[in-house]
Image (cartoon, grey):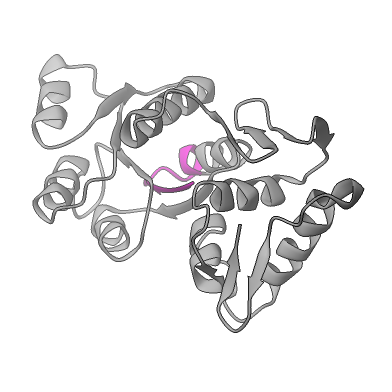
Amino acid sequence: MKILLIEDEEEIALFTKKGLEAELFAVDVANEGEKGEYMARTNDYDIIIIDYNLPYKNGIEVCKNLRDAGRKFPILMLTAEKDVGKKVEAFANGANDYLTKPFAIEELIARVRALLRHNSQSSSTEFSYKDVIIDLEKHIVIRAQKVLSLRKKEMALLEYFLRNPGTILTRSMILEHVWDTNADPFTNTVDVHVRSLRKKMNIDNLEPLIETVRGIGYRI
């Protein structure tokens, strides 16, 4: 799942990005409101985390503009403001949740997962496909009752496949959803990770699940 974090305080942005990436999220960061709004309008994100006080455009303005533009992803507002009126203002302009600074990264992650579950109408972070089970909170993947040893990026890649069964995913789609915007689109990193994941998934001569669609991409 891919997150846009709009936060101008560098230390908080770095701390939050690292915490979210440890939970298998791909995270892009914008350090001011105008840039963040542009990125949210032009890229496909699963959730947006916005600081209330931002340069050029504040979080409320960004939130309202995104809702007016028809963007429906969940929005979580961050702020040092404890005034109830600020919370009401955030919700009135399209925010789905509100978290006061300073915050524990564990609470932020829990709120992000809750918003994603609500948005997908799924009540669990564990789901399955054929003989594969993935638990996103415990970071466990099981195939045919055997626990697989996957790297974080391989697990994030598998999650994206399992959320889109039967769908042909192009290399650019995979790069956009599983990696952040700093990834080089001209490298073969997607192919390398898919090969590694496929090798680890094809244990004990089980049915191959990841198919190469020649000239286009991959599907599960």
Give coordinates of residue 181: x percent, y percent: 49, 64
Relative height, residue 182 to residue 213 (above, below): above
Report the front residue among 61 and 69: 69
Count of numbered circles in the view: 0
Report the front residue among 34 and 170: 170
Query: Image point 47% across, 37% down: which residue?
Result: 12
Please report the bounds of the magenta region as a residue range: 1-13
Give coordinates of residue 99: x percent, y percent: 33, 23
Give coordinates of residue 43: x percent, y percent: 35, 63
* Left or right for 32, reference 28: left
Report the front residue among 200 and 46: 200
* Left or right for 22, reference 110: right
Relative height, residue 191 to residue 165 (above, below): below
- Magenta-colored stretch includes residue 206: no
Give coordinates of residue 69: x percent, y percent: 12, 56
Query: Image point 29% across, 57% down: which residue?
Result: 40
Residue 189 in which image quadrant = bottom right
* Left or right for 43, reference 71: right
Query: Image point 44% across, 53% down: which residue?
Result: 29
Quadrant containing the C terminus in the rendered view: bottom right
Residue that lies at the very extreme toward the right in this rendered image: 204
